[in-house]
Image: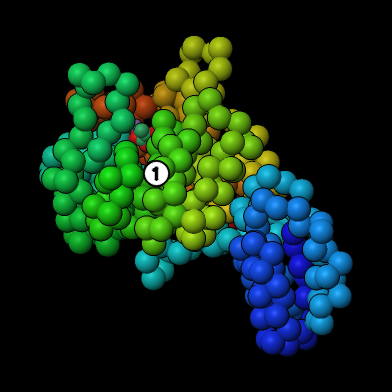
Amino acid sequence: MIISMKAGATQAQVAHVIEKIESYGYQAHPIYGQERVVIGAIGNGQMKDHIQSLESAPGVDSVMPILKPFKLVGRELKKEKTFVRVGDNIEVGNSHFIVMAGPCSVESREQLMTTAVAVKEAGAQILRGGAYKPRTSPYDFQGLEEEGLKLLAEAREATGLKVVTEVLSDGQVSLVAEYADIVQVGARNMQNFALLKKLGKCGRPILLKRGMSSTVREFLLSAEYIVSEGNPHVILCERGIRTFETYTRNTLDLSAVPLLNELSHLPVVVDPSHGTGKRSLIKPMAKAAVAAGADGLLIEVHPNPEEAFSDGPQSLQPAEFADLMQAVRQYAAIENRRM
Ligand code: PEP
Ligand code: MN
């Protein structure tokens, strides 16, 4: 239910409505706009029984049901785009176009530092790198774990880049959140609801990747889990879905970008690396992502992709990444985004 207060409603009137909503067993989520306060009443009950009583409360302008199942992350309750702050000077979702880049896995100090310096020089703002890797085979490289997190922190110290890295389980949340500026939920964990609930309480921005067989509705409901537990700082990431096509690793669903922007106020970034799995397709898909209305990109870069412990075939060399950045900068300018 959305309770829209009249312009100029007093604080006491807002407080009274919140109290009423809570007495009916709902959570109240007030949004303080420029002109008026809008209050979301979120819960499971039969709110329609309470509409009349709320409509007649002083200061209330209108009461409307929220029709979509994703209530907090949907545009019905909050029309304005959400900006997710990362550190002091990055806001994902505003007019700046944000690029997160780095290796699939953190492999060594030298590999990470070389990549970090190169992506920073090319204009990336955020360093990516997995310390805990969700590998399909248990015999594949599983990541450097805490040692990898420490290397990421060192690279942040040395370059000033912020750090995004993946968490695999709810038991790891506090450790990963200690080191990361953004905590990543991988495609394989998009519906790990225990993990999502824990991340709702972790106080760090979350990069939520779309599950490889997930619908947009399921994707937004996973974001809803995090936000409803108290963490509104969620960035959505389209990273490709499974289809019958086998030339590419996944089918990058770029139509999801404008669709997500219609349905949700959360920022949306695109990962053309996992979305295609093929080095040659990454630059064209990165340009297309800007045109589709993405707020940023996630790109895998490795100093020597042939030797990469994971995802070599989709990793760009630093020079290829710099070339991509130049193209993306031009496309971003067309879309009135700054880099
Ligand atoms: C990754 O970002 O390295 C990763 C494992 O991605 P995804 O979860 O999208 O497969
Ligand atoms: Mn990868």
The residue carrying mark 1 has its beta carbon less than 8 Å from ligand 1: no
Where on the picture, by quarter, is residue 288?
A: top right
Q: Position of residue 335 (x, y in %)?
A: 63, 52
- Tell me: 31 left or right of 185: right
Residue under the image location 49 percent in, 12 percent down: 246
Q: Position of residue 208 (x, y in %)?
A: 46, 44
Q: Position of residue 282 (x, y in %)?
A: 46, 31
Give SS at disc 1.
helix
Q: Give the colour scheme of this rendering.
A: rainbow
In this view, the residue in front, 69 or 274, is 69
- Tell me, yes or no, if residue 124 can be seen here: no
Badge 1, how many Cα within 10 Å: few under 14, some, many 20+?
many
Ligand 2 lies in which image quarter? top left
- Tell me: 224 left or right of 300: right
Q: Position of residue 284 (x, y in %)?
A: 52, 32
Tell me how many marks there are: 1
In this view, the residue in front, 276 or 87, is 87
Residue under the image location 65 percent in, 55 percent down: 43
- Tell me, yes or no, if residue 199 can be seen here: yes
Residue under the image location 50 percent in, 42 percent down: 237
Residue under the image location 41 percent in, 58 percent down: 201
In this view, the residue in front, 121 or 164, is 164
Q: Is residue 158 above or below residue 18?
A: above
Amino acid type at circle 1 is Leu
In this view, the residue in front, 116 or 78, is 78
Q: Which residue is mark 1?
A: 195
Q: Is residue 139 above or below residue 34?
A: above
Q: Is residue 91 above or below residue 131?
A: below
Quadrant location, the N terminus = bottom right
